[in-house]
Image (tube, grey):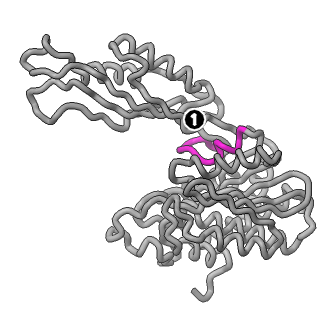
Amino acid sequence: MAGDTPALELARALIRRPSVTPDDAGCQDLIAERLARVGFSIERLRFGAVDNLWAVAGDSGPLLCLAGHTDVVPAGPTEQWSHDPFSAEIVDGQLYGRGAADMKSSVAAMVCAAERFRTAQPDHPGRLAFLLTSDEEGPAVDGTKAVMRWLADRGEHIDFCVLGEPSSSTHLADTLKNGRRGSLNACIRVQGRQGHVAYPQRADNALHRLIALLNDLTTHRWDDGDAFFPPTSFQVSNIRSGTGAENMIPGEADAVFNWRFSPLQDAESIQAVVHEYGARHGIPPDAIEWRLSGVPFITEGGALIDAARRAIRQHCGHEVELSTAGGTSDGRFIAPTGAEVIELGPLNASIHQIDEHIDADHIDRLADIYHTLIGELLHG
């Protein structure tokens, strides 16, 4: 579309590629071609069904990594969208499309910021890198997690990392994420004995025992949080039991639940509490399958947050709030290496929703913020 700025044009080109996880749909090829033109060395990393991109410019010094994902969640029922989810329409100044907010617009802004910086200062101190994956919205096994193992094997260390996740709440860059809570998932199957509801003495109601356990877990006070993190939370997401007959006592009951936990907890401490409650209701530890999605991480301060504050102040005219709220991100795979990590991106109000959209003008403002931040950290 005539009149699009380079960042907006790139964002629309990326949205038009239906890169539903783990399919990259050519997004990384488009980005790699542009980065190569401004001196980035390009390495494509294919792990399983996942495409990853690692690109680096610069010879030595601190490494600043701009990270993100090119995959998106499914569009859902397309007939409910006001515009085709992969057409990248602009209506009344709003850019619509799956990935507009999460997170193709910020990826486009990062690429354009890097192009501008490298063109103006090709001999800058330090190194600038991109880490992109098509596996953030999926299992997140063969994406950033795998790339970080690959980098460790090469002895490569990231000093600073900016993820373009949609961090803003009500206006652009009002919030940046300087950490995330951990996420622990559990699936439980309680075994009882099926029977007739009129003869409970001849049965063992698995659902009653499951409900008793869940009551203990929902009323348990896990912790009070700390200066950076809210208290650990527990949520039940699914329960299944019975045959549908109103006169049968269920012999099995299943549930799925999740903790979003602060650094005051870890997987082992949570599991110990669950096993203790489970023992009270005759539920053995092997009735539960656990999956740890990520551990808490935090960047309390440092050069990266300071640079982000100054860049936001310069281009938005306000102070930014630090937050650890929300879900998980690929920062959980990067922060444990010792890198300073933040998430800074567009408004998150419509992510994963029908008619996902952002203000089209925000993409250029993001590019300006990223450009200033790069210059501050690499002393350009």
Residue drawn where x is 41% and y is 33% of the image = 257
Residue 154 horizontal side relative to residue 75, left or right:
right
Label 1 sits on what residue type?
Answer: Gly
Instruction: Locate the N terminus by quadrant.
Output: bottom right
> Where does residue 327 sit, x and y in percent of width and height?
53, 44
Above or below, comparing residue 265 to residue 111 in the picture: above
Q: Is residue 29 magenta?
A: no
Q: Which residue is situated farthest in the left direction here?
A: 198
Residue appearing at x 59%, y 71% in the figure: 26
Q: How many numbered badges does the structure rendering display?
A: 1
Residue displayed at 71% across by 70% down? 32
Q: Is residue 148 left or right of residue 61?
A: left
Mark 1 highlights which residue? 182
Q: Badge 1: few (under 14), some or many (20 or more) residues near its Cα, within 10 Å?
A: many
Q: Which residues are magenta?
A: 322-336
Q: Is residue 168 visible?
A: no
Quadrant location, the C terminus = bottom right
Q: Position of residue 137 (x, y in %)?
A: 52, 53
Q: Residue at x 68, y 78 (%)?
A: 6
Q: Nearer the viewer, residue 316 or 83?
A: 83
Residue 91 shows in this picture: yes
Element under disc 1: strand
In this view, the residue farthest toward the front is 48
Residue 322 vertical position relative to residue 315 in the rendered view, above or below: above
The answer to whether residue 200 is above or below residue 93 is above
**Residue at the bottom extreme, as displayed:** 2
Image location of residue 359, percent across then percent down = 55, 69
- Rendering coords of residue 82 (x, y %): 38, 73
Quarter of the rendering containing residue 57: bottom right
